[in-house]
Image (cartoon, helix red, strand yellow):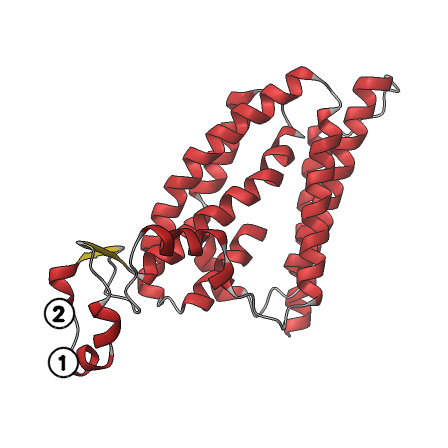
């Protein structure tokens, strides 16, 4: 859910029309499927070395929750994605056309003139003259790269969150893939309801703190054998309850 909120901010900053967002999300999800496989393999392997790694994962999830609280406090401030690592990397390796050219991530230099009007050609003449490469990236590709790298950062807390439920790599990866495949549709649901679900993000923050506490408690149980652990079934009920409270509180506020 917190991933979707960031995607909304990125699309808004790049001014990507809704008709092109499906395409960006489609390729973004393909990248997420690949990167999650790497993180699940690494995460489950690290847990095999020492149960103390669960404390590290708990700290990562809690840190993510704290960052969401800080972002919520500064919600009026719009992040400048021109300083994003992925944004700067694209500009380093590719020339970038200053505006969207349909749904294309790249266009041939020879085809640019045919896709813009004579008036635009005059306005952008200086910038077009600097585009010497055969293939030119578009802002849609910039947006995709920023979303992909942001998703990699989210994997740092999402993988530990799933590992809090199961340590079996196949179960962890399968659960994450089903969740990711639903992101594309869920994004547009959340986009339509964002003005009504005012407390949903706060519910997500509460859940992240709960997951961090669960990881820390389970880790201490494995190390000190005190016998106190939160079961997967209990976690599921807590997740449903917290999200339910966030949704219903938002709907009452909207009325």
**Quadrant in the rendering for residue 19:** bottom left
Indicate left or right for 6 with 58 as reference: left
Q: Residue at x 66, y 51 (%)?
A: 204
Pick the residue in front: 237 or 112.
Answer: 112
Farthest bottom residue in view = 119
Indicate left or right for 213 with 40 as reference: right
Q: Which mark, by number, is residue 118?
A: 1
Q: Residue at x 75, y 42 (%)?
A: 210
Q: Is residue 242 visible?
A: no
**Residues at marks 1 and 2, CA–CA distance in whole angstroms:** 8 Å
Q: Residue at x 27, y 55 (%)?
A: 105
Q: Residue 48 location, x and y as percent? A: 65, 16
Q: Which mark, by number, is residue 94?
A: none
Q: From the viewer's perspective, is residue 42 above or below residue 64?
A: above
**Disc 2 secondary structure class:** helix
Quarter containing the C terminus: bottom right
Q: Residue 192 location, x and y as percent? A: 48, 65
Q: From the viewer's perspective, is residue 115 above or below residue 190?
A: below
């Amino acid at each position: 859910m917190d991933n979707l909120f960031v995607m909304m901010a990125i699309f808004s900053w790049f001014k990507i029309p809704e008709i092109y967002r499906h395409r960006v999300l489609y390729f973004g999800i393909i990248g997420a499927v690949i990167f999650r496989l790497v993180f699940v393999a690494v995460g489950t392997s690290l847990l095999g070395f020492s149960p103390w790694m669960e404390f590290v994962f708990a700290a990562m999830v809690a840190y993510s929750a704290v960052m969401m609280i800080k972002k919520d406090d500064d919600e009026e401030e719009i992040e400048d994605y021109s300083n994003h690592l992925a944004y700067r990397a694209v500009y380093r390796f590719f020339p970038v056309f200053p505006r969207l050219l349909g749904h294309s991530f790249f266009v041939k230099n020879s085809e640019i003139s045919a896709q813009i009007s004579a008036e635009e050609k005059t306005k952008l003449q200086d910038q077009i003259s600097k585009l010497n490469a055969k293939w030119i990236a578009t802002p849609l590709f910039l947006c995709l790269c920023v979303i992909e790298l942001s998703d990699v950062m989210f994997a740092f807390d999402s993988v530990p969150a799933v590992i809090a439920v199961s340590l079996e790599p196949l179960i962890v990866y399968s659960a994450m893939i089903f969740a990711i495949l639903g992101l594309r549709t869920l994004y547009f649901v959340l986009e339509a309801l964002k003005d009504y679900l005012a407390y949903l993000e706060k519910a997500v923050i509460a859940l992240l703190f709960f997951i961090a506490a669960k990881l820390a408690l389970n880790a201490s149980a494995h190390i000190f054998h005190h016998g106190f652990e939160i079961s997967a079934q209990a976690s599921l009920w807590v997740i449903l309850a917290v999200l339910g409270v966030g949704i219903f509180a938002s709907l009452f506020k909207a009325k």
